[in-house]
Image (spheres, rainbow, N blue to C red):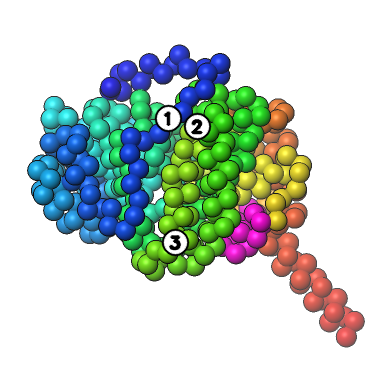
Amino acid sequence: MTAKSKNAMEFFNTDFTVFGAPGRYIQGVGVLDLVGLCCATLASTAVLLCDKTVAGLIEGRVVASCRSAGVALSVIDFNGEIDASTGPSLARSIDAATKPIIIAAGGGRTIDAGKALRDEVGGALLTLPTVASNDSPTSKNYVLYDADHRLIAVRHMPSNPDFVLVDTALIAGSPKAFFLAGLGDAIAKKFEADRCFAAGGPTMFRARSTRTARAIANECYRQLILNAADAYSVAGSGNPTEAFDAAVEAMILMAGLAFENGGLSIAHALTRGLSNVRGACKAPHGLQVAYGLLVQLQLEGNGYPDDLLALYQATGLPTSLVDLSLVDVSDDDLLTIAEPSALVAHTANFSRPVTAQDLMFAMSAVEARFSRQNDVNAASQSYGQTQQTA
C-alpha cells in the first residue's frame, strides 16, 4: 500500500470502533542486534535513516546484523527538519524500485522522517527509537513543521510500522531530559482517552474509541505512577532496571496504542498554541503536553489526582507556563495560546464545548495555583514582612 491509497481509510467513522497497532513490538536489552533478522522477514534490502550522533551509537551493529541476515543495507544521513518536502526529498536518495525496508533510528524527528519516506514510496518500516521522548515509534501518524518549528500538519501512513525495536540499554543511556519529555507525553493519555470516549469523539483512525484502548491507557497511567520516578532516577546511566523497563513500555507501547486508538483531547490540543508563543515554543512536545494536562484537569473541574501531582514533583514535570520558560505571562500570551488550540479537532473531544476564553480562564487558574514564580513572589513577600516585623 502506498501513499496514493491512504484515503482508503476515509470510510471509517464514529459508527465503528477500530484498533490498530504495529506488526511486532520487541523490547529488551540487546534488541538492536535483531534488526537484520526482522528486516529479512520483509525484504532483501534496507535503508538505515539516522543522524550522525545516532549512527555513532548503532550503525556498526546494524550493519553487522543485516550482513549476518543477508540483507543489503545502505545508510542515509538525516539532519533536516520535518516539512512537506521531507518525504519527496528522501525518496530521491533511494532506489524505491527495490522496495527496501526503511529503518528509522533515533528520536521523534528521524522516526517521523522515516514515516514520511515510507508514505512516499511504500514498502515496510522498522522504527528503532534511541530515546523514549515520545510514543511515535508505534504509530502511523507523523507531524510536519514550518521553518519556525511550528506544527502545521499531521499526516497518516496507511498502516502502522511493521516492526518496533526498543533496546532498553540503548535508551537508558540517553539523557534524562529525553525521558522526562516522554513521561510528560505519556502521562496524559489516560485522561485524554477518557474524555474522547465519553464524548464519542474520533480517534486517529477517524473512528470511535475502543474499550481496549481505554484499558491500555489506564494501565499506562498505573505503570507510570508506580515506576516512572524510580525509572527517571536511573535514566542516563545506561543501566536499565525493572522499573525503567516498565516505564519505557508504558511510554512507548502503551501510550502509543492509547493515543491512536483512544483519542486525544485538550492536553494535546494545547500544544498547537504553545508552539506559537515565546519561550514555551522551545519546550519539548512532551513537556508542553504535561502542562496541557493540568489545563485539561482544570477544565474538568474534578481536582488534580494526588499521585499525579506527586509524580510531577518527583520528576520536575512542568506545572506552569513559567516552567516552560514563558516568564511574565500576559493576557496576550494566553490568547496566543488559546485561540489556535480551541480550533484543533482534539479540543472537541471533551464533555462540553471549549472556547478560547475557557482555555484562557483555565490557564490563568493553573498559573495561579502552580506557578513557581508565584511561589517565589510569595516567599519574597513573606520574607519582607518578617524583616519589617523584626
In this picture, residue 50 sits left or right of residue 342: left
x, y (%) of residue 371? 69, 58
For disc 1, the neighbor class at 10 Å (few under 14, some 14 to 19, many from 20) is some
For disc 3, the neighbor class at 10 Å (few under 14, some 14 to 19, many from 20) is few
Q: Nearer the viewer, residue 52 or 156?
A: 156
**Res. 332 visible in picture:** no
Q: Of callouts 3 and 2, which one flags the residue occurring earlier in the amino acid sequence? A: 3
Structural distance between the alpha carbons of marks 3 and 2: 27 Å
x, y (%) of residue 208? 55, 24
Q: Nearer the viewer, residue 87 or 131?
A: 131
- From the image, tell me which residue sits under label 1: 20
Quadrant in which residue 353 is drawn: top right
Task: Give the residue type that dot 2 points to.
Answer: Asn
Q: Which mark is residue 242?
A: 3
- From the image, tell me which residue sits under label 2: 261
x, y (%) of residue 340? 59, 33
Q: Which mark is residue 98?
A: none
Magenta stretch: includes residue 62? no
Up/down of 36 relative to 172, above or below: above
Q: Magenta segment, which residues?
A: 307-323
